[in-house]
Amino acid sequence: MTGEKDYSKLDFIVYKLKEGFQKKTLIFCDSLLEVDAIFFNYFWAQLDESERVSLAKRLVHYNLMTHTASTDAQTKAVVATGFGTGGNCKILISTISFVMGVDVADIRRVIIWGMPGDALTLWQVI
């Protein structure tokens, strides 16, 4: 094994979004680097040039947001509202910083991308 991630395993999410799938998916990553890698190396590559023009357009088109400990307070508030119960965001790529103490009732899929370092963190995520 080379240690490289196979982002094509996430293809079904893009397919579901393009087909109008409306249920929420949380992609939990074990690091900020993984959040960025999934967003930029995978989802960003799925967008055509016109969709890459502005962050707002990307988020509206794919209903996609990211959240890490280094996310600024204003963006964290937008993410909490957008991905919260009844919010419009359909995919959140996040580290443990979002899931600690949060209960979003309408999440239908949790993808653990990279195992957490301990059992307690894994329990919190699922």
Image (cartoon, grey):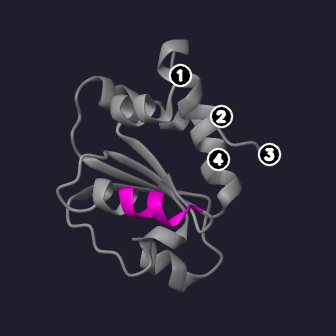
Residue 70 falls in which quadrant of the image?
bottom right
Q: CA distance from mark 4 to mark 1?
A: 18 Å
Which-is-in-front pick, marks 4 and 1?
1
- The local crowd at label 4, few if under 14, some if 14 to 19, many if 20 or more residues have their Cα within 10 Å, is some
User: Circle 2 sits on which residue?
Assistant: 41
First of labels 4, 1 by sequence position? 4
**Magenta portion: prevailing SS class:** helix
What residue type is disc 1 on? Answer: Val
Residue drawn at (31%, 47%) of the image: 89
First of labels 2, 3 by sequence position? 3
Return the residue found at the far front.
74
Q: Where residue 71 sits in the image (x, y, percent)?
A: 57, 61
Label ID, residue 36: 4
Q: CA distance from mark 3 to mark 4?
A: 22 Å
What residue type is disc 3 on? Answer: Met
Going by the image, does 90 lie left or right of 47? left
Return the residue found at the far left.
86
Going by the image, does 115 lie left or right of 47? right
Q: Where residue 41 sits in the image (x, y, percent)?
A: 65, 34
- The local crowd at label 2, few if under 14, some if 14 to 19, many if 20 or more residues have their Cα within 10 Å, is few
- Could you tell me which secondary element the residue under label 2 belongs to? helix
User: Circle 1 sits on which residue?
Assistant: 53
First of labels 3, 1 by sequence position? 3
Which-is-in-front pick, marks 3 and 1?
1
Residue 93 seen in the current view:
yes
User: Circle 3 sits on which residue?
Assistant: 1
First of labels 3, 4 by sequence position? 3
What residue range appears in magenta?
A: 71-78
